[in-house]
Amino acid sequence: MIQSLFDTTITRIPKTQGIKYTGSKLKLLPYILRMVSKLDVQSVLDGFSGSTRVSQAFAQCGYQVTANDTAVWSEILGTCYLKNRKQPHEYKNLIEHLNHVPAEDGWFTEHYGGLPNAGSAIQADGLKRPWQIHNTRKLDGIRSEIDRLSLDTVSKAVALTSLILAMDEVDSTLGHYSSYLANWSPRSYQMMQLKVPRLFQNEAEHTIVRNDIFETVKNRQFDFVYFDPPYGSNNEKMPPSRVRYNAYYHVWATVCLNDKPELFGKAKRRTDTSDTESASVFEEFRRGENGRFLAVEAIERLLHCTNARYILLSYSNGGKSTAEEFFETISNQGRLLEMKEIDYKKNVMSTMKWTHEWVNEAKKTNCEFLFLLER
């Protein structure tokens, strides 16, 4: 069976909202939701929630959602979308107030704001900046005002989410914050403007967790779990890419915390996103002493300690050897109900056979696999 990757007739696809995100599952949502809709499921865990698009979709489809991630900005986004019980218009006055806050020269402008310089983003110090100074000045003013206001937890999350979305629309990057463009992007000249996020009223009591996934699944049971670990490169000659997600979105952590952290490097990353302080074993594709990929061992350990009837696991292709180990790992973790290959290059999705034939398919570029297991 071959289906268009963008065929949304498979199931009702709720609208979701998020930042530009390397690990976004927006295109996978039709297939994730179709697979879970065929099961007797009430409680779901989105184990690596990231920009929370999958969690948002689960919540709007009526499931009781637990959204887990280690990133503070993911926690803020999850609180904004999954904890909200108000009508969107009830936040209009707050957002309008923040839009009228006077701009100011503050910490964000000092470190991340740049002058136009006839189109060049390279500043006098030789470094590039992710935003033009007129937008970081607004960022500084608004972020200070959010802390001055006596906002409840959800309202503050809505305000911060609105601020993040607004800054995401006027950046001068390729979609992440580990490096910046040499020449200003056209969107960076625009004046950022806060808008009420695309909210929905939640009836179920959803849970937002910022924790290591192994701690989150400990002593807890779910009907359905979706795991999308942040896979790294399997090239052993390259340094581990475990800093990718922490490094890519370090600015959003600082916007949420407003903690004026120590910075390092040309991109002025938070020091707590350095290799020595920030690590995810799932992005560690070097081999251990026993010759197995450390990331694959971590997936095996995670599946083993997860108490759920159904587990849906994403796998991004990383080369034949990694796929073979992955195949062996999940073969022993439950009964395979369904397996899908999504080929982004061809914009098609197909049903695959659970044989070593899929390993050869994994050598393709821009392919992703979905495995639905029953325990």
Image: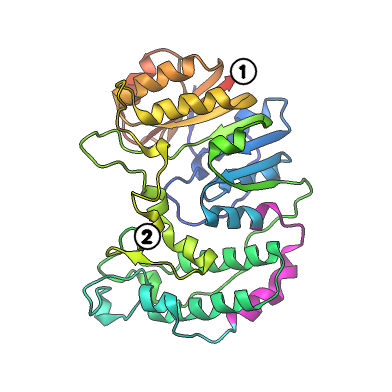
Q: Is residue 168 left or right of residue 323?
A: right
The residue shown at (32%, 27%) is 288
Q: Is residue 2 above or below residue 180?
A: above
- 22 or 189: nearer the viewer: 22
Q: Callout 1: 10 Å neighbours few (<14), some, many (20+)?
A: few
Q: Which residue is painted at 54% across and 35% down in the image?
A: 214
Indicate the position of residue 39 as horizontal and vertical percent values: 68, 25
Q: Is residue 2 left or right of residue 84?
A: left
State the mark number for residue 375: 1
List the residue tagged with mark 2: 271
Task: Provide residue 353's location: percent of width, then percent of height.
Answer: 45, 15
Magenta residues: mostly which secondary structure? Answer: helix
User: Which corner quadrant holds the C terminus?
Assistant: top right
Within 10 angstroms of label 2, few (less than 14), some, or many (20 or more) residues?
A: some
Label 2 residue SS? helix
> Which segment is the magenta one?
80-99
Q: Is residue 251 visible?
A: yes
Secondary-structure class at tag 1: loop
How many numbered marks are there?
2
User: Per the image, is 22 magenta?
Assistant: no
**Per the image, is 89 magenta?**
yes
